[in-house]
Amino acid sequence: MKPADARAPRATDPLDHVEVWIFDLDNTLYPASCDLFAQVHRRIGEFIARQLAVDLDTARQVQHKFFLEHGTTLRGLMTEHGVEPSAFLDFVHDIDVSPVPPDPSLRASLERLEGRKLIFTNGSVAHAERVIGRLGVAGQFEAIVDIAASEYLPKPDRRAYDRMIASHRFDPRQAAMVEDMAVNLRPAHALGMTTVWVRTAHDWAGPKEGEDHVDHRIDDLSDWLAEVVAARGAAGRAAG
């Protein structure tokens, strides 16, 4: 199907019409306090140091430069050094996921949440499967749309969103996207999705002053989803 090019009017409650729920993985499905990215960040530096035969300080500079210029360090390594993406992803995601606690409440809410559910991540399928296995929510998602499925175009590149929509055939105006990085919600908003930002302690992850592409701001995904499920259930009973 052809992706929508612009937003359209919504119902009074922007969650009433949601049929597809799109979740980021890291710092969204599990709390940012688990700090898995500290491990990933370290592994990225180690990979660059080995790949480019430089010291760790230089590797960190390259890592930061590529992130700023290419959206992800991986994209920079692929573009400027021809790095094989699977080798990078396997190395940097070889981390300890035990800081992620099982979340029975999240599982219960996902089981009761009506609609299709997708994970949309700049990470890999293997990493996502390890994390959702640890959370206890494996089997709750129709698909994991990872960086490989996006042809290594990272969020917030609009083309990654268009590919996801085309591959999974849904109307973005009937979708909601949940993310801890507000910048990644800009394309979703432009496509007509309801956007949900999960607050973290990182100021840089939030929307800039004056930006209006965030519809809902939440602190805890499990608590919020439980409220959504309850509200939708109550609305359904009232309508019946």
Image (tube, rainbow, N blue to C red):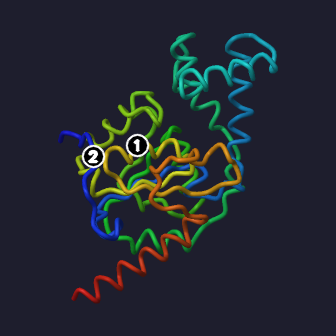
| Residue 76 spot, x, y in % from top left | 56, 19
Q: Secondary structure at mark 1?
A: strand
Residue toward you, 17 or 46 = 17
Task: Give the residue displayed 58% in from the left and 32% down from the top.
Answer: 90
Mark 1 packing: few (<14 Cα in 10 Å), some, or many (20+)?
A: many
Mark positioned earlier in the residue sequence (1 or 2): 1
| Residue 158 as seen in the image, left or right of residue 126 | left
Q: Are marks 1 and 2 in contact (CB under 8 Å)?
A: yes
Task: Give the residue displayed 38% in from the left and 58% down from the top.
Answer: 21
| Residue 85 spot, x, y in % from top left | 52, 24
| Residue 24 spot, x, y in % from top left | 49, 50
Task: Give the residue displayed 43% in from the left and 32% down from the top.
Answer: 157
Q: CA distance from mark 1 to mark 2?
A: 10 Å
| Residue 183 as seen in the image, left or right of residue 206 | left
Quadrant (top left/top right/bottom left/bottom right) for the C terminus: bottom left
Residue 137 to residue 201: above or below: below
| Residue 34 as seen in the image, left or right of residue 149 | right
Residue toward you, 133 or 53 = 53
Q: Which mark is residue 26?
A: none
Quarter residue 186 falls in: top left
What amino acid is labelled 2 in the image? His
Residue 103 to residue 162: above or below: below
Mark 2 packing: few (<14 Cα in 10 Å), some, or many (20+)?
A: few
What amino acid is labelled 1 in the image? Val
Quadrant (top left/top right/bottom left/bottom right) for the N terminus: top left
Residue 187 to residue 88: above or below: below
Query: Where does label 1 land, which residue?
Result: 145
Query: Where does label 2 land, which residue?
Result: 168
Q: Secondary structure at mark 2?
A: helix
Residue toward you, 104 or 33 = 33
